[in-house]
Amino acid sequence: MLSQTVPCDQFVLVRDGPVGDELAAVIDSFARARPGLFTIVELPGNVSLGLALDAGLQHCRNDLVARMDADDISLPRRCEKLLKLFADNPKLAIAGANIDEFYDDPSRVVSSRVVPSDCESIRKFMRRRSPFNHPTVMYRKSEVLRCGGYGPSPRKEDLSLFARMLNMGCYALNLPESLLLYRSSPDNYRRRKTWVNCRGYVQVEWEHFRRGYCSLWDLAVVAAGQMTLFLTPLPVMRFLSDHLLRRKTERGPLRA
């Protein structure tokens, strides 16, 4: 993020509870090297991701905020391209892009997650799955706060926020290109194949149904899909995930 073609004028970093001495030293070294750029938000204890993001948003000076995870890699023109999209669409409230996934070597992309680009397709996609790649999004802080922020949901806090934003009239777009390298691993399949993850996804979808954001059929499809992934053997779950939810590939990243 510090190598973007359009540099940020504030870098809000949330320390979600205590961190190790080595990581704390890295954070401090960057803050000293760039005085005035970093706003370090220290939370006394580990909270849910949604609450940590809400805490960070409260310290953002600008209305346009680029979301970022600690272990991914934004391509150099990510912010430049998203800022242009906002400049060209004054009513735009949230935008993102596709991602390329890698394991250990960022130069070797193993899969991509492609999301819909136009607003109508995004709204339709949202009924069952997240229509954004969360680490790529840029949004208006004022609109996120108007729609209630992320909230305390322990799972799928991003899908919960995005559904509320779209159903409260927010205009949304995605750029049809990959702008971020997402750090994944084979262990991600095991983490997704847990009862906590399955239950959390269905609970969020139930809340969408209760609010009228999706149909009973959408709820049934999500519940059946999550139970299938939870109950099937890991190799089958991996096959279904790779062939239905991702585009498998073996190539280098597209340097946007």
Image: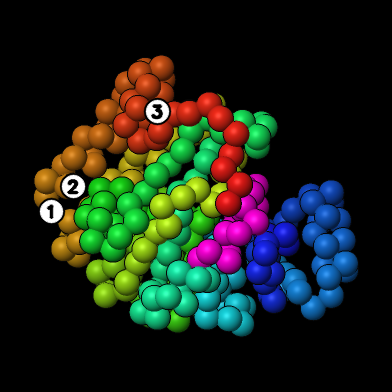
CB under 8 Å between discs 1 and 3? no
Numbered mark located on residue 242 in the image: 3
Q: How is the image coloured?
A: rainbow
Spatial CA distance of label 3 from label 2 is: 22 Å
The answer to whether 199 is drawn above or below residue 126 in the figure is: above
Mark 3, secondary structure of its residue: helix
CB under 8 Å between discs 2 and 1? yes
Residue in the image at 37% along x and 30% along y: 241
Viewer-nearest of discs 3 and 2: 3
- Looking at the rendering, the stretch of residues picked out in magenta corresponds to 68-82
Locate residue 89, reporting x and y percent: 39, 76
Q: Which amino acid lies under the numbered mark 1 shown in the image of this protein? A: Ser
Residue in the image at 45% along x and 69% along y: 85
Residue in the image at 13% along x and 53% along y: 215
Q: Which residue is mark 2?
A: 219
Query: Splitting the image into 4 quarters, where does residue 43 fall?
Result: bottom right
Numbered mark located on residue 215 in the image: 1
Which is more N-terminal, label 3 or label 1? Answer: 1
